[in-house]
Image (tube, rainbow, N blue to C red):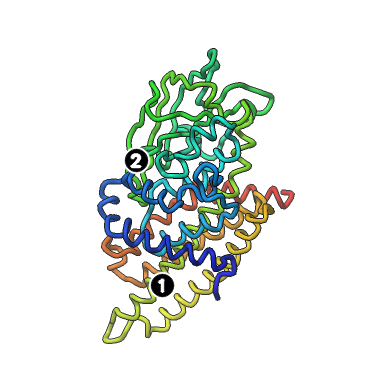
Amino acid sequence: MRSTAYTTEHDAFREVVRDFLAKEVVPQFPEWERRGVVPRELFVKAGALGIPGLQVPEEYGGGGSTSFKFNAVVTEEAARAGVGIGGLSVHMNVVVPYFTSLCDADQRRRWLPGLAGGELMSAIAMTEPGTGSDLAGMATTATRDGDHYVLDGAKTFITGGINADLVIVVARTGAGQDRRDGLSLLVVERGMDGFTRGRNLDKLGLKAQDTAELFFDSVRVPAANLLGEEGAAFRYLTGNLPQERLGIAVAAQAAAESALRQTLDYVRERTVFGNPVSSFQNTKFELAGCEIEIEAGRAVLDKALDEHDAGTLSGADAAKVKVYCTELQSRVIDRCLQLHGGYGFMLEYPIARMYADARVTRIFGGTTEVLKTIVAKSLGL
């Protein structure tokens, strides 16, 4: 069955993205994986096509799109090509919406053109060494001192943290009756005194995606870099989570579809006992099962994409689709790797890298377990 979420306009954009990835990413990707980071010039090249700023207003050099589906096309095509695009997905799907929705007029003039063109890459720093999904447990502090905030603390697992020029840091600026009160968003800019980057973390998968530790030692952040209202960060964060989780679901679904395509090609070519692997009943049943699950995942995802564009996708429903598609991704890729036999364990075969990359999708953006609690709460439990 064909996806029902996209129009001819999306299909035309898909061809542009596919060509861009084939020319600018696929040939260089193995080297980027070895280096552990995507070169910054890729983002400027993508900016020439309008990719980083799809949802940035046109007056600031962006695409002015109100549809998330164009972002989804970029994610799907990267999965289809078997490549990663570093922190670009987080920049587009997670961070830019904070800027477009919360910037005041001056901040829009300062930041949006660069964000749209790829000259300014962004990241968001939430996770801390002592906290994971518990956003309210953050220990990073920002104390007001005249026209500045003095920022102290550390963040970890920050996607795009090496390449980022602008980092939205979640910090505690006050306290309240609820642990969620008193959190604010501050934009820390490259080169600010006291802002340092630690290791580019060595991960199991997603090797070309820079993932960094960030440290803030009495960083004086201008009050003009406060994003939105002081103390309102928790509301902003929870408001943007549906799109973040939907973006992860898109990547997971596309990866499962890509794994099935590659495995179908492999089992037709590979012979065992003088017969193609595809001729065995177990192979047929395993891949038929994968196809059935993938079709179900695509139906769930298409509905979520439609609802998100219509503004009706709830936080609980975004949690459902993220859980479903990421769990599906892991099941399908595991079965596909098994059908590759020993070659599936060799990194020269794409399925091995896909297996490693898949594991984290059930963790970042909210673990499966945390998201199930959100779904349970929506059931009145």
- The residue to which callout 2 is attached is 201
| Residue 354 vertical placement versus 237 (above, below) | below
Q: Nearer the viewer, residue 331 or 103?
A: 103
Residue drawn at point x = 30 percent, y = 63 percent? 345
Q: Quadrant of residue 197?
A: top left
Foreground mark, 2 or 1, reads: 1
Query: Would residue 127 be seen by someone viewing this image from the given angle?
Result: no
Side of 163 where 317 appears, left or right: right
- Residue type at mark 1 is Arg
Side of 106 where 257 appears, left or right: left
Q: Secondary structure at mark 2?
A: loop
Q: Quadrant of residue 231?
A: top right
* CA neighbours of label 1 inside 10 A, class few (<14), some (14 to 19), many (20+): some
Q: CA distance from mark 2 to mark 1?
A: 31 Å
Pointers 2 and 1 in contact (C-beta within 8 Å): no
| Residue 111 vertical placement versus 318 (above, below) | above
- Residue 201 locus on image (x, y percent): 34, 40
Residue drawn at point x = 40 percent, y = 69 percent? 336
Residue drawn at point x = 47 percent, y = 52 percent? 361
Sequence-wise first label, 2 or 1: 2
- The residue to which callout 1 is attached is 261
Residue drawn at point x = 44 percent, y = 51 percent? 360
- Residue type at mark 2 is Leu
Side of 330 where 381 appears, left or right: right
* CA neighbours of label 2 inside 10 A, class few (<14), some (14 to 19), many (20+): some
Query: Would residue 351 be seen by someone viewing this image from the given angle?
Result: yes
- Residue 372 locus on image (x, y percent): 61, 51
Q: Nearer the viewer, residue 209 or 282?
A: 209
Q: Nearer the viewer, residue 129 or 16?
A: 16
- Residue 167 locus on image (x, y percent): 46, 34
